Image: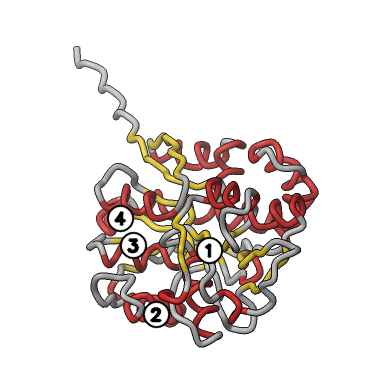
Amino acid sequence: MTALARPAAAEEIRIGYQKSSTLTAILKTNGELEKALAPLGVTISWHEFTSGLPLLEAINIGSIDFGADVADTVPIFAQAAGAKLAYVAEEAASPSAQAILVPSSSSVKSLSDLKGKRIAVTKGAGSHFLLLAALSKAGLTFKDIAPAYLTPADGRAAFVSGNVDAWVAWDPFLTSAQRQSNARVLSDGSNGLASYKRYYLSSAAFADRRSDVLNAIFGKLDETGKWVKAHPKEAAAQLATLWGIDAATVEEANSHRSYQVGVVTAPGLSEQQRIADAFFAEGLLPVKVDAGAAKIWTPKRD
């Protein structure tokens, strides 16, 4: 009598995300990703991070398998630290989804007025590059301001309390602050200042080992991005509950984001190199980074 074969143990995939990881937040809530991965013998554990840089650091040390999603600057900082990353997917540019905010009563009227000001920004976030690009446009450098490196929550608190002169924020924090404190947008990323793409990444080793998992994740992200844009009110109602922000604010914030999930290409990473070179020139990166050196994973088409 032969013994019955034991079913293979399910593999747990660890997914890191941020509060602003809209598509992932929806998938975490509706269970659709678990359903898609179940036939592959995969389960999910979810891990929330306050910003993108710690998330990619977690991928680098092997405590997270997949990161969803981070601003364009974040992989550059991770590469500078020696991380072996794989670009899995991108969200198309959303330049108005991040901005430099000042109080409505502020004397700061132009980018050049930022000289000598204390500005809250999250280190390594897309907003960090927006600030750098805006200063450059005004003929200023990072040394001309007093940066306060803060998480989104701490940055908002400092901004509302008047402890900083400006705050560089991204959605949904950006729109929420505008609506609640009547903050004024000094500049967003429009007119070629900062495209603000968001990327989904894994370690290069995980991309090589579980392309099947990434294929399923890519499909669900694409599907969810299209759903959010086609059902703005329903999506906003779901996210309002998750984020603790009113639905009208969420809907407005979502209108600034493309949520257009696509394949990463080498030519499409051209702004990544511009970001890397700008940070290195300012002495904010310890080494020069070749943005194109990161692995690019490509989904399998049916």
Residue at 34% across / 47% down in the picture? 65
Viewer-proximal residue among 156 and 89: 156
Mark before the other along the chain sequence, 2 or 1: 1
**In screen coordinates, is 227 left or right of 44?**
right
Q: Earlier in the sequence, mark 3 or mark 2?
A: 3
Q: Is residue 20 left or right of residue 200?
A: right
Disc 3 to disc 4, C-alpha distance? 5 Å
Task: Compare marks 4 and 1 and give the one earlier in the sequence.
Answer: 1
Give the structural element (helix, strand or loop) at label 1: strand
Q: Which mark is residue 28?
A: none
Q: Is 43 placed left or right of 9 in the picture?
A: right
Q: Position of residue 198 (x, y in %)?
A: 51, 63
Q: Residues within 10 Å of mark 4 (few under 14, many from 20)?
A: many
Amino acid tagged 2: Ala
Q: Residues within 10 Å of mark 1 (few under 14, many from 20)?
A: many
* Image point (57%, 36%), residue name: 31
Which one is earlier in the sequence, the residue at label 3 or at label 4? 3
